[in-house]
């Protein structure tokens, strides 16, 4: 992927920090607003370090650069934020800047409700659309009337990128004589070898419900085509959740449950607790998003590694769950939208990019080669991300597909994991809701 010149200048330090947020970009109206005592409230899902600390530091830096400005940052869980944000904005309260989950999870409904500021002028001013391929930008796009996902204009900007894969404990895997698999069947053979060695093959907790979307989605990504996945998410064509790829992925997931590959009692274990168990050495692998890399690297050190879900056949394609992170948008309650936009630009600045890389996290965009350290979990992650970005193999989160679909798909996945429905029933239940969602 070629990097746009503006992004390259920022990342090589050719654009000084003072210029990036001084009069040349902010302009007199911005500075005048900053001289009045102004508080910018930021709500997002960066509720734990190192991500929380990074945003706190960026907010403090922005406040120091803009006289009279205070930045208040509050981190939420995703579920809390999605439930709370539309209600408080509708009540003329809440934050100036907030993460608004992609697709029909939240962005579509909030655009249709007139709760977000049109950032078209800011996209042009700050160059937020530069340096990322169209396929990633589409995930933060809606038509102005909020009816078409994946086209139109940007409504938010992502600080992070995301890709779901498998973190692994090199010591446990090595002691079991397991090599990194190159096919899906090879992964299952690895799981069985680990189980035979008395290890938990896949540490997994689904108390929070969203981890099942990732697990199922990554299995489905080994079987899905780009045409199907983009079609079902962006609602183009006549795609159906009763597609054979959905049924086959559901059957494969139930096979993993029946074989005992998942952590015992996974339905009563939270995602954070599952990650903590893995990072403490209890289990061989953890299927999780790139956001977990920082703590995995800190807690497992040189024993930690990362690889992507392997294809069905050697050399095949997998559409990995992920894309850009939840975008930061400006709500209609923003006291000063210009100042809020300048803060968002700070969140996607060179300073932010380097802070995320230094923490072993994944910022949006291609990772420069000089930032990749071989034989480390972050190095594995960055190499995998760059490869997926170059090959256009980033998939989607299936809950983006329709308003309210998150509750439906997580509920159906709970029943699927509990062996309470057949793969065909699972697919039919999803399609029933999906088909009726825009009638």
Image: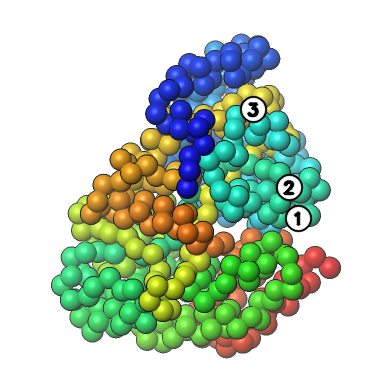
**Residue wearing tag 2:** 152
Name the residue nearer the viewer: 1 or 273. Answer: 1
* Disc 1 crowd, CA 10 A, few/some/many (<14, 14-19, 20+): some
Occupied quadrant, residue 37: top right
Q: Is residue 251 left or right of residue 368?
A: right
Q: Nearer the viewer, residue 264 or 176?
A: 176
Q: Are marks 1 and 2 in contact (CB under 8 Å)?
A: yes
Q: How many labels does the image show?
A: 3
The CA distance from mark 2 to mark 3 is 18 Å
Q: Where is residue 371 in the image (x, y as percent from the top left)?
A: 32, 41
> What is the number of the mark on residue 125?
3
Outermost left residue: 175
Residue drawn at the location 44% of the way across and 73% of the way down? 316
Q: Residue at x 39, y 44 (%)?
A: 367
Element assignment for label 1: loop
Q: Is 35 drawn above or below residue 165 in the view shown?
A: above
Q: In which quarter of the image is the C terminus?
A: bottom right
Q: Which disc number belongs to residue 148?
A: 1
Mark nearer the N terminus (1 vs 3):
3
Q: Can residue 17 be seen in this view?
A: yes
């Amino acid at each position: 992927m070629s990097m746009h010149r503006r992004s390259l200048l920022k990342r090589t330090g050719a654009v000084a920090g003072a210029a990036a947020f001084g009069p040349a970009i902010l302009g007199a109206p911005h500075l005048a607003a900053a001289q009045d005592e102004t508080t910018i409230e930021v709500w997002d899902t960066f509720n734990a370090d190192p991500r929380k600390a990074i945003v706190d530091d960026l907010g403090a830096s922005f406040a120091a650069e803009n006289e009279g400005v205070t930045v208040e940052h509050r981190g939420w869980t995703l579920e809390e934020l999605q439930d709370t944000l539309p209600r408080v904005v509708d009540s003329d309260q809440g934050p100036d800047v907030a993460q608004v989950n992609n697709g029909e999870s939240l962005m579509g409904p909030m655009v249709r409700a007139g709760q977000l500021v049109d950032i078209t002028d800011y996209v042009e001013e700050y160059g937020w659309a530069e340096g990322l391929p169209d396929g990633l930008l589409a995930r933060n796009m809606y038509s102005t009337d909020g009816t078409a996902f994946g086209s139109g204009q940007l409504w938010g900007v992502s600080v992070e990128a995301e890709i779901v894969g498998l973190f692994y404990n090199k010591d446990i895997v090595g002691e079991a004589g397991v090599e990194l698999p190159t096919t899906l069947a090879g992964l299952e053979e690895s799981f069985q070898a680990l189980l035979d060695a008395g290890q938990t093959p896949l540490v997994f907790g689904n108390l929070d419900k969203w981890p099942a979307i990732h697990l199922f989605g990554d299995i489905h990504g080994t079987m899905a085509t780009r045409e199907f996945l983009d079609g079902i998410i962006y609602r183009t064509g006549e795609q159906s959740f009763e597609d054979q790829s959905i049924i086959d992925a559901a059957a494969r997931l139930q096979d993993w449950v029946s074989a005992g590959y998942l952590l015992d009692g996974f339905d009563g274990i939270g995602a954070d607790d599952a990650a903590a168990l893995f990072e403490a050495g209890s289990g061989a692998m953890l299927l999780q998003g790139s956001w977990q890399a920082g703590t995995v690297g800190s807690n497992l050190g040189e024993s930690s590694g990362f690889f992507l879900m392997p294809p069905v056949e050697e050399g095949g394609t997998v559409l990995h769950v992920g894309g850009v992170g939840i975008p930061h948008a400006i709500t209609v309650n923003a006291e000063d939208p210009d100042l809020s936009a300048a803060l968002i630009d700070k969140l996607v600045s060179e300073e932010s990019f380097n802070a995320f890389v230094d923490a072993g996290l994944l910022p949006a965009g291609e990772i420069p080669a000089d930032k990749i350290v071989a034989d480390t979990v972050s190095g594995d992650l960055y190499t995998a991300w760059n490869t997926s970005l170059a090959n256009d193999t980033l998939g989607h989160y299936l809950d983006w597909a329709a308003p309210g679909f998150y509750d439906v798909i997580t509920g159906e996945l709970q029943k699927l994991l509990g062996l309470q429905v057949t793969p065909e029933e699972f697919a039919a239940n999803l399609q029933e809701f999906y088909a009726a969602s825009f009638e």
